[in-house]
């Protein structure tokens, strides 16, 4: 059998008349229609002369056709390269210069700006795709053949390159193979009990691994359906929850929905599963959700480079604050960051992962790739965490967010958890800021619940008895909200930058 991930998807589908994807404004594609349009798109790409391994860079708005373009790239054996819709022209220039795509697909309104830049960088053709499925790609597809012989590829051939969000330094292109995508999607379908009776509520962006691979590939391999929302919108979520069965979201979806007075057991009774990932879900949010809806959110953990690594179980205990055990077929270990020495259960250290889900390396960065892998093939995630006696993993944060103060290591998560447990606190973020004596000073940014008036002294008096002196924040700052990216991740870099002169 072909190793093309698309062939696996095709072989799993039984009913061509089944709806694959629909939008909230009434547009839809059955599986049969999707096969045809993906064939037409693949024929258009072939007409531009793409061959196996060529990149197709895509910066378009979320639409069913954008997902079908991803499938067309798989079929044609070319490497799908989705780009965040927020990237500016200057940023695009970096990605196009780095990835050297053969074809670029952009929204019709950006064509005049992107085409000359792309063509000066050697791009053969720039096509357009609008949110209604309009644009030159669709126009050329209309006269292309509705069938296409899926290209044979090797397991280790690239299916996609996803640039990491690059909060420090230049963004890196993570190279994902057909085998990476196939193994993770297969595992998740089984682990989360997906069947063709499921409909996924899809409110995530589709340029990121969560909304693109986790969500879409799982639906495709289970012949299920999905409902596309242009973006997260509580009103639409409420409406679509009446027919959907599963939602995949980032933690901010859940905290925002908890503020809705319609959220209760009745409004969620058609749903069988709520999944959270991409950023830490507070144990409090997990509990509040269960209290209001009766559902236990299933939290999982992964990253662009590795696909999904761990997940709380479907049937067993979903532990608030934990991302669950390693997925079947995936090995996770905790090591001492410097030496790579294995650490015992319950000790915090570097989370490392090995398995068929782990990427092939960073695009055109062999040295960077080599330095992020151990000699025995484990990938060094850069996340600090620990594993308990039952194998459940707890993520404490990125290693680069570790605060080193007066020579002591302070894990921000430990301080944040203490602050978050104080009555009246909504959430917090702890960072290290430059300090003449300590090197870095532990500093907390605190968001209070509406109508609460706590002072710096109130919070300090609560932390003082429970934390060692060196872990105590030197200052506590009150703000209205934490800076976050579209995937709900707190931007600690931004907090550090904003307050870099606090102790000067
Ligand atoms: P990305 O490559 O954008 O998906 O980001 C991956 C990073 O998100 C991981 O390395 C973690 O730091 C973080 N992350 C993903 N899922 C979780 C989770 N459930 N809990 C805590 N952090 C998470």
Image (cartoon, rainbow, N blue to C red):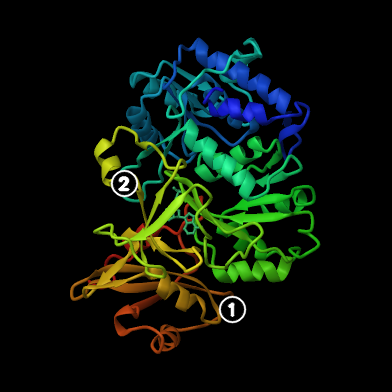
Residue 81, given in percent of the width and then of the height, sits at 46, 31
Q: Secondary structure at mark 1?
A: loop
Number of marks in the rendered image? 2
Q: Residue at x 26, y 45 (%)?
A: 371
Question: Tag 2: Cα neighbours inside 10 Å, few (<14), some, or many (≥20)?
Answer: few
User: Looking at the picture, does residue 142 appear above or below residue 220?
Assistant: above
**If the image is split into quadrants, where does the C terminus sit?**
bottom left
- On the question of residue 41 being in view, the answer is yes
Q: Left or right: where does residue 113 sit relative to residue 368? A: right
- On the question of residue 231 being in view, the answer is no
Question: Tag 1: Cα neighbours inside 10 Å, few (<14), some, or many (≥20)?
Answer: few
Q: Left or right: where does residue 504 sit relative to residue 66? A: left
Which is more toward the observer, 391 or 396? 391
Q: Residue at x 63, y 42 (%)?
A: 230
User: Looking at the picture, does residue 319 appear above or below residue 178?
Assistant: below
Q: Left or right: where does residue 404 sit relative to residue 22? A: left
Q: Residue at x 63, y 24 (%)?
A: 134
Question: Toward which corner of the image does residue 222 lie, by quadrant?
Answer: top right
Residue corresponding to mark 1: 451
Residue corresponding to mark 2: 376
Q: Are marks 2 and 1 in contact (CB under 8 Å)?
A: no
Question: Toward which corner of the image does residue 52 lie, by quadrant?
Answer: top left
Residue 146, given in percent of the width and then of the height, sits at 66, 14
Cα distance in 3D space between marks 2 and 1:
54 Å
Mark before the other along the chain sequence, 2 or 1: 2
Which is more toward the observer, 232 or 45? 45
Q: Nearer the viewer, mark 2 or mark 1?
A: 2
């Amino acid at each position: 059998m072909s190793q093309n991930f698309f062939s696996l998807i095709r072989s799993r589908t039984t009913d061509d008349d089944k709806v694959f994807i629909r939008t909230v404004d009434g547009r839809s594609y059955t599986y049969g229609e999707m096969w045809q349009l993906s064939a037409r798109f693949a024929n258009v790409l072939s007409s531009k002369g793409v061959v196996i391994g060529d990149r197709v860079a895509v910066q378009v708005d979320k639409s069913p056709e954008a997902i079908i373009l991803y499938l067309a790239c798989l079929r044609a054996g070319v490497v799908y390269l989705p780009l965040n819709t927020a990237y500016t022209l200057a940023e695009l220039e970096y990605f196009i210069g780095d990835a050297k795509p053969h074809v670029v697909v952009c929204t019709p309104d950006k064509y005049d700006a992107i085409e000359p830049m792309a063509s000066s960088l050697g791009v053969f053709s720039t096509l357009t795709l609008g949110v209604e499925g309009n644009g030159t790609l669709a126009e050329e597809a209309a006269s292309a053949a509705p069938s296409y012989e899926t290209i044979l590829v090797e397991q280790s051939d690239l299916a996609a390159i996803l640039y990491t969000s690059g909060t420090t330094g230049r963004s890196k292109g993570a190279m994902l193979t057909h085998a990476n995508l196939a193994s993770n999607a297969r595992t998740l379908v089984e682990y989360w009990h997906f069947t063709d009776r499921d409909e996924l509520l899809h409110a995530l962006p589709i340029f990121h691994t969560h909304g693109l691979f986790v969500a879409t590939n799982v639906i495709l391999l289970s012949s299920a359906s999905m409902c596309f929302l242009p973006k997260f919108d509580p009103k639409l979520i409420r409406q679509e929850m009446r027919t959907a069965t599963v939602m995949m979201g980032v933690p901010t979806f859940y905290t925002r929905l908890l503020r809705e007075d319609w959220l209760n057991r009745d409004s969620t009774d058609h749903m069988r599963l709520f999944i959270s990932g991409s950023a830490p879900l507070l144990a409090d949010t997990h509990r509040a959700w269960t209290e209001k809806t009766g559902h236990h959110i299933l939290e999982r953990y992964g990253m662009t480079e590795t696909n999904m690594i761990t997940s709380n179980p479907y049937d067993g205990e979903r532990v608030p604050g934990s991302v669950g055990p390693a997925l079947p077929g995936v090995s996770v270990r905790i090591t001492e960051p410097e030496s790579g020495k294995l650490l015992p259960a319950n000790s915090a250290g570097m989370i490392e992962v090995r398995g068929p889900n782990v990427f092939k390396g960073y695009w055109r960065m062999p040295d960077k790739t080599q330095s992020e892998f151990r000699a025995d093939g484990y990938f060094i995630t850069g996340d600090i965490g620990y594993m308990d006696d039952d194998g459940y993993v707890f993520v404490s944060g990125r290693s680069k967010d570790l605060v080193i103060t007066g020579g002591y290591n302070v894990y921000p998560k430990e301080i944040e958890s203490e602050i978050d447990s104080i009555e009246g606190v909504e959430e917090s973020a702890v960072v290290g800021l430059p300090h003449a004596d300590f090197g870095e000073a532990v500093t907390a940014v605190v968001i209070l619940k509406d109508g609460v008036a706590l002072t710096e002294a109130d919070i300090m008096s609560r932390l003082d008895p429970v934390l060692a002196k060196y872990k105590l924040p030197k200052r506590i700052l009150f703000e209205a909200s934490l800076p976050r990216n579209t995937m709900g991740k707190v931007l600690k870099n931004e907090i550090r930058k904003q307050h870099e002169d606090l102790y000067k």
